[in-house]
Every structure is written in C-alpha cells, then in structure tokens.
Amino acid sequence: MPFRSPLAALLAAALLAGCASTAAPVAYEASASPAKAARFDSDLSHCRTRAEQAVGINGVKGATLTQASTRRGATEFVKEAVDSLVVGSRNAWSRARGAAAGEAAGTLAGVLLNWNEPDRVHREFVDRCLKERGHTVLGWR
C-alpha cells in the first residue's frame, strides 16, 4: 500500500531506521580471540543494562530536542512571514506556515532517527563499567 503523504513515508522510514541503537563501544581486546570477544559481549550487555538503569540512554536529549524544535519552528515562521511581507508576497502566511511545518518535520525526523542513541553520560558510564571489568575501550562506532 503506497503512502498517501510524504510525511507518513518519512515517519515510517525513520521509525524503521531507528529501531536499534547503532553506536557501540569498540574494545582493543575484543578482536584478540573468540573467547575474549564473547567475554566482551557479555560484559557489554551487563554494562549497558546497568547504564540504562542508572542514567538512562539519552534522558536529556528528548527534552532538549523538543525545546529546540519549538524554537526553530517559531523562528522559521517569523522569518518567513517577515521576508514575505517585506517583498509584498500575497501568500505570506501560507509560506510562513510551510516553513514552520518543514522545520518541525525535519526536527521530528532527527528525533526519530536518534531517539535510542546513547548520549555522552550513558557512554561514559558504559566505558567506566567496561574498564572496571578489564577492557580497554578505544571509542564508539
């Protein structure tokens, strides 16, 4: 069944693309042997669970993005309305509403694509937990 609106298609694609977190720590010793890789995977699962319980995966990000989206949408609305009025456009308000809607849709897509990506605090928690368990984290990918 084809989507009747581009926004519905965008939301569906964002939802499917954002179903699983893509960022994960990379450890030095994880590629040394299959046994070390299995131990790292087990420790990573444990540390991620502890981090989600202690600090969440991206607790601050949701509120911050909502506020930023509201500000950007309002700013785009005002900017486009003023620009349209200055040049004497007859459809100033429809252009302003379109700009605000476009900005809101872009921000929504960003939120949907990144909703489950770990923030800095979550990553730091996992890094420290893995270090306590004897792993050397090189970074995240």
Image (cartoon, helix red, strand yellow):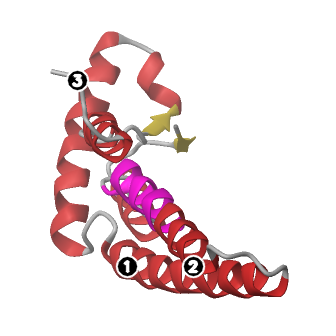
Q: Is residue 38 above or below residue 19?
A: above
- Amino acid under disc 2: Arg
- Amino acid under disc 3: Pro
Please identify the quarter of the rendering in which residue 111 is found: bottom left
Q: Earlier in the sequence, mark 3 or mark 1?
A: 3
Residue at screen point 67% across, 76% down: 90
- Which label number is shown at residue 84? none
90 relative position to 100: left or right: right
Residue at screen point 34% across, 73% down: 62
Of badges 3 and 1, the one in the foreground is 3
- Amino acid under disc 1: Val
Mark 2 lies on residue = 72
Mark 2, secondary structure of its residue: helix
**Bounds of the magenta span?**
103-115
Q: Position of residue 30 (x, y in %)?
A: 42, 25
Task: Report the Cα–Cα distance between label 3 and label 1.
Answer: 36 Å
Residue at screen point 39% across, 61% down: 108
Q: Position of residue 40 (x, y in %)?
A: 31, 32
- Which label number is shown at residue 2? 3
Closest to the observer, 102 or 40? 102
137 relative position to 75: left or right: left
Task: Report the Cα–Cα distance between label 2 and label 3.
Answer: 31 Å
Residue at screen point 48% across, 66% down: 120
Looking at the image, the residue that sits furthest to the right is 87
Confirm or deny contact between disc 3 and disc 1 (CB under 8 A). Answer: no
Q: Is residue 125 above or below residue 85?
A: above
Q: Earlier in the sequence, mark 2 or mark 3?
A: 3
Looking at the image, the residue that sits furthest to the front is 90
**Magenta segment: does it hold 83?**
no
Mark 1 lies on residue = 60
